[in-house]
């Protein structure tokens, strides 16, 4: 699906005009190759009973081409927490899944 509007294009141009470095991010997100949103167990980046921060997990995820964007309590109907506050607060991740964006260079089989 694809939606294009003058408002969307105007907003994109404004973002690029304000901060040129955002163009690279928008190219990755909106480009032909696109990106995928994936859900992966936090255990992929945190050991059992390890207390660590979202920032540490994000750093570990970035080494395999993922950008963490949030988390959700596993097997819960609660909403996924996107761009969480308190990214520097250590917590246990044993019962969480992580939401991430992957570029087209990451194979789907590696994520799940």
Image (spheres, rainbow, N blue to C red):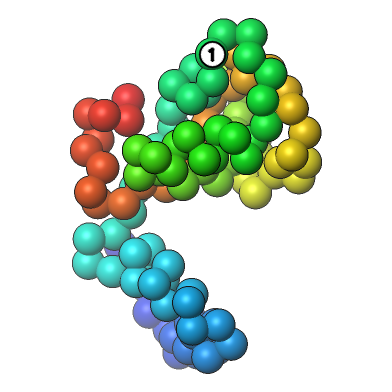
Horizontal and vertical percent position of residue 7:
51, 86
Question: Which residue is depicted at the point 35% across and 44% down?
Answer: 65
Q: Residues within 10 Å of mark 1 (few under 14, many from 20)?
A: few
Question: Visible in this render: residue 18?
Answer: yes
Q: Nearer the viewer, residue 2 or 47?
A: 47
In the rendered image, is residue 11 in sight? Answer: no
Quadrant of residue 94 within the rendered picture: top right
In the picture, the quarter occupied by the C terminus is: top left
What residue is pinned by disc 1?
Answer: 47
Left or right side of 63 for 68: right
Which of 31/61 is in front? 61
Please name the residue shown 62% across and 40% down the image: 55
Q: Is residue 109 above or below residue 93?
A: below
Of residue 8 and residue 83, the one placed in the foreground of this image is 83
Q: Could you say whether the residue bearing mark 1 is in a helix, strand or loop?
A: loop
* 26 or 53: nearer the viewer: 53
For the N terminus, the image quarter is bottom left
């Amino acid at each position: 699906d694809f939606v294009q509007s003058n408002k969307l294009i105007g907003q994109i141009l404004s973002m690029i005009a304000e901060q040129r470095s955002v163009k690279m991010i928008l190219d990755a997100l909106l480009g032909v190759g696109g990106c995928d949103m994936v859900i992966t167990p936090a255990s992929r980046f945190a050991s059992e009973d390890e207390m660590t921060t979202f920032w540490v997990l994000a750093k570990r995820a970035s080494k395999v081409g993922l950008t963490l964007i949030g988390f959700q309590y596993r097997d819960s109907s609660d909403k996924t927490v996107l761009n969480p506050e308190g990214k520097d607060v250590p917590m246990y991740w044993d019962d969480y899944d992580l939401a991430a964006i992957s570029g087209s260079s990451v194979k789907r089989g590696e994520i799940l």
